[in-house]
Image: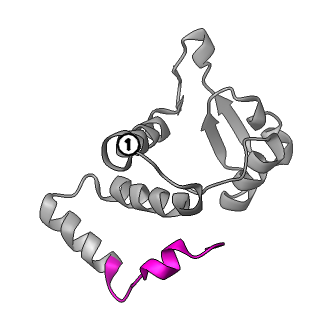
């Protein structure tokens, strides 16, 4: 996951191009910002939520919707506010939660401890402008 500045078509498509191999089959919903990916070397398959179609063969968005549901639950149930300045950190945390969700508790704690090794974030660095 990565914070992008907006949901405009060039921004979204450039993010896809920068983070996936050309020729990749990209599954998503029918958001207009994704249209034209086929002209950029991607196979684009969309599910049509507006038509109450949530799966079309291999095309579905269940996995990413599950991730966003976890982020929303974290926002509403843990943090109550996520600053734009620190949003990338929250997304990194929830990405880690997603990657370790199938682990048992001991393995999750070990994974978390390994991620923290030799990392220190001072409060002054956290609140510094432009960080």
Residue plotted at (62% across, 29% down): 29
Secondary element type, mark 1 = helix
Q: Is residue 110 above or below residue 5?
A: below
- Furthest toward the top, the residue is 51
Question: In front: 29, or 97?
Answer: 97
- Residue 107, quarter of the rendered image: bottom left
Range shown magenta: 116-131
Question: Residue 60: where, in percent of width, then height?
Answer: 52, 30
Q: Quadrant of the N terminus?
A: bottom right
Say which residue label 1 marks.
70
Q: Nearer the viewer, residue 78 or 53?
A: 78
Q: Quadrant of residue 53?
A: top right
Q: Dot 1: few (<14), some (14–19), or many (≥20) neighbours within 10 Å?
A: some
Q: Is residue 74 above or below residue 95?
A: above
Q: Position of residue 127 (x, y in %)?
A: 52, 72
Q: Is residue 100 above or below residue 11?
A: below
Residue 67 painted magenta: no
Residue at the (40%, 55%) spot, across then down: 94
Residue drawn at (48%, 81%) of the image: 124
SS assignment for the magenta stretch, majority: loop
In the picture, the quarter occupied by the C terminus is bottom right
Q: Is 114 positioned to the left or the right of 32 in the image?
A: left
Task: Using the image as rendered, state which of residue 35 and residue 89 is in the foreground.
Answer: 89
Residue 127 highlighted magenta (yes or no): yes
Question: Considering depth in this image, is 58 or 105 the residue closer to the camera?
Answer: 105
Residue 26 image point, x, y percent: 64, 42
Q: Residue furthest bottom?
A: 118
| Apparent side of residue 65 relative to residue 70 in the rendered image (left or right) | right
Decide if residue 126 is on the left or right side of residue 2.
Answer: left
Q: How is the image coloured?
A: one colour
């Amino acid at each position: 996951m990565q914070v992008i500045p907006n949901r405009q078509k060039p921004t979204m498509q450039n993010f896809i191009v920068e983070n996936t191999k050309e020729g990749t089959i990209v599954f998503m919903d029918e958001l207009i910002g994704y249209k034209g990916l086929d002209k950029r070397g991607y196979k684009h398959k969309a599910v049509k939520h507006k038509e109450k179609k949530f799966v079309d063969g291999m095309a579905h968005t269940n996995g990413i919707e599950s991730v966003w549901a976890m982020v929303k639950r974290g926002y509403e149930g843990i943090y109550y506010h996520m600053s734009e300045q620190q949003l990338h950190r929250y997304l990194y945390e929830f990405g880690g939660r997603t990657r370790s969700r199938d682990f048992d508790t001991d393995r999750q704690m070990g994974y978390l401890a390994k991620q923290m090794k030799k990392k220190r974030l001072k409060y002054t660095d956290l609140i510094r402008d432009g960080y």
